[in-house]
Image (cartoon, coloured by chain):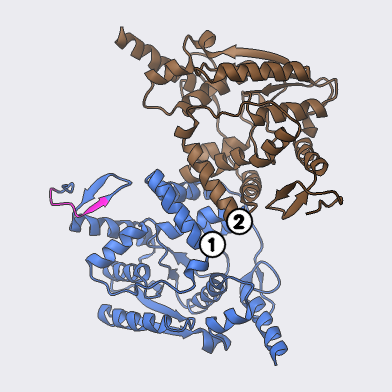
Chain colours: A blue, B brown
Amino acid sequence: MKCKCGNEGIYYQAYSNKYLCENCFKEEVERRVKKVVKPYMKRGVKINIGISGGKDSLVMAHILNKLSYPEVKLRCIFIHEGIEGFRDKALRVVKKFCEKEGLELKVIYLKEEFNYTLDEMITLLKEYKPCSICAVFRRYLLNKYSKDSDYLAIGHNLDDHAQTILMNYIEGNIKNIIYFGKDAEGFVKRIKPLKYVPEEEVKFYADLVKLEYQKEPCPYSSLSYRHKMKEIIKLLEKMKPGVRFSIVRGYEKLIKLINYEEKINRCKKCNYPCSGELCKVCQYLELIKERMKNEL
Amino acid sequence: MKCKCGNEGIYYQAYSNKYLCENCFKEEVERRVKKVVKPYMKRGVKINIGISGGKDSLVMAHILNKLSYPEVKLRCIFIHEGIEGFRDKALRVVKKFCEKEGLELKVIYLKEEFNYTLDEMITLLKEYKPCSICAVFRRYLLNKYSKDSDYLAIGHNLDDHAQTILMNYIEGNIKNIIYFGKDAEGFVKRIKPLKYVPEEEVKFYADLVKLEYQKEPCPYSSLSYRHKMKEIIKLLEKMKPGVRFSIVRGYEKLIKLINYEEKINRCKKCNYPCSGELCKVCQYLELIKERMKNEL
């Protein structure tokens, strides 16, 4: 099958019913990223890139690096949450990648910041899903270390985006629905360069440009509700190619029609923006402290 | 397992993790219906009931009849769309039911109104799903024959409700998202008495009070996207009992925050409220006319 340019197609895009050649495929992925990030890519701007070693964050960092003017300052931030036998490998991958791309890398260890690795936290907080704990600490640290930056770029692809939106709809979680789509006061502004790139295209791109990314999934990921939502989105996409786009685009229109303002509090202990008295990180840390006391 | 009242439980409600006895089960279903319809059940009010012969519409009509003051005027409306071998059976079921309940019944034939049965329309409009054609004509006629009534009661249960909401979210159909939750100008006001009753409870109730309803599904239903969405909702409900409620309740909260007004047009041919120049019914009828001409 031929690509629109006449070359041999090497990739079939089900939702557009088109074949793309290597060049047109890469161009299309890069164009979608550019469309999202262009308004932010100004001279003197500092962008932090959350990097994990997986295909998404490496593709994002690679394309941002390719698209950036020299006057845009990019810096990769790697959160080492301390998942035994998984995150060390990821760090090796990321170090090699950043060296090759000439990108600055900052590594932050959960253990150094909070005295516990994620593995240790999980054994103390058994009633919580690992992903809910990890996401909270990861987000906290990414924000903390982006205070001197203008933006924080996150490697969420179209599938992640559609999953989060659908999960919030299904859970009827109005505040999450609203805040996922709006910039929350007190947080560094987030950019999601891959939000219109389907997961399978991120992967295909990574392989085309020969990025060496970590292929094994996080050992905790299969336990998550998100993982199940992922399967449902795959099912929907098979039934109706293009639903991931329609979920995201519909959501983006909807969110513009919503009239809602809520005063953001500050955590009494750490001053982090939150809705209650204590932020989630301090709530978890209090619980850990309590349980450690009981263990002694 | 015991019911909260001490009697033997005969029904297990997964989302509340409770067992209910026959009486408490029936009371709970009726209480949920009452909560929805109470604001409308006033002296002198006329309510049309859309009735199909399936479990949902019979349970709805039965409970409305049970809850109504004598001063509330209930009338059942049956749309005979002309599905061979299916709808005649339904009509027999409905006639018997209305006689037993002492309810007035009005039967409307698609063939008499528009010269074609649904079966005939479907063969002429092959590019459309049967359900999309049927729903448009059914809605049109229910509205037309409810002009002299205050409300139109529709037998959508919790599952139908959650399906529609989720379908609109997934398709990103903003107008449908908004209009499903708001009363549209120019249409008779709709009430959905069963909107908080899960499908399996409607069925269980129907069997408990020995309603004779049509058990065979519409021969076209398995072709619909809605049918697939039904399976997805079942999957979600298994994963997280209660998601149907959270989808509906979240939606109800969300819709209140939305600021959107659109001027409703009137169809140039029939004056039915619509968004474009011609309403959907007139669009289908024009297409049928054209194709009949080509066939001659």
Q: Does residue A223 appear to the left or right of B186 in the view shown? A: left
A142 shown above or below B5: below
What is the chain identity of the residue bearing mark 2? B
**Residue A123 position by quadrant:** bottom right
Report the residue marked by disc 1: A225
A289 shown above or below B126: below
For the residue carrying disc 2, how many other residues have a C-alpha within 10 Å: few (<14), some (14-19), or many (20+)? some
Measure the alpha-carbon separation of dots 2 and 1. 9 Å
The secondary element bearing badge 1 is classed as: helix
Report the residue marked by disc 2: B240
Residue drawn 54% across the image and 50% down it = B235
For the residue carrying disc 1, how many other residues have a C-alpha within 10 Å: few (<14), some (14-19), or many (20+)? some
B270 shown above or below A252: above
Rendered location of residue B246, percent (x, y):
64, 51
Q: Which residues are magenta?
A: A6-12
Disc 2 vs disc 1: Cβ atoms closer than 8 Å?
A: yes
What is the chain identity of the residue bearing mark 1? A
In reply to whether residue B248 is colored magenta, the answer given is: no
Q: Main secondary structure of the magenta part?
A: loop
Rendered location of residue B260, percent (x, y):
58, 39
Query: Disc number at residue B161?
Result: none
Q: Amino acid at mark 2?
A: Lys
The secondary element bearing badge 2 is classed as: loop
**Residue B37 position by quadrant:** top right
Residue drawn 15% across the image and 49% down it = A5
In reply to whether residue A10 is colored magenta, the answer given is: yes
Residue drawn 65% across the image and 37% down it = B157
Residue B240 seen:
yes
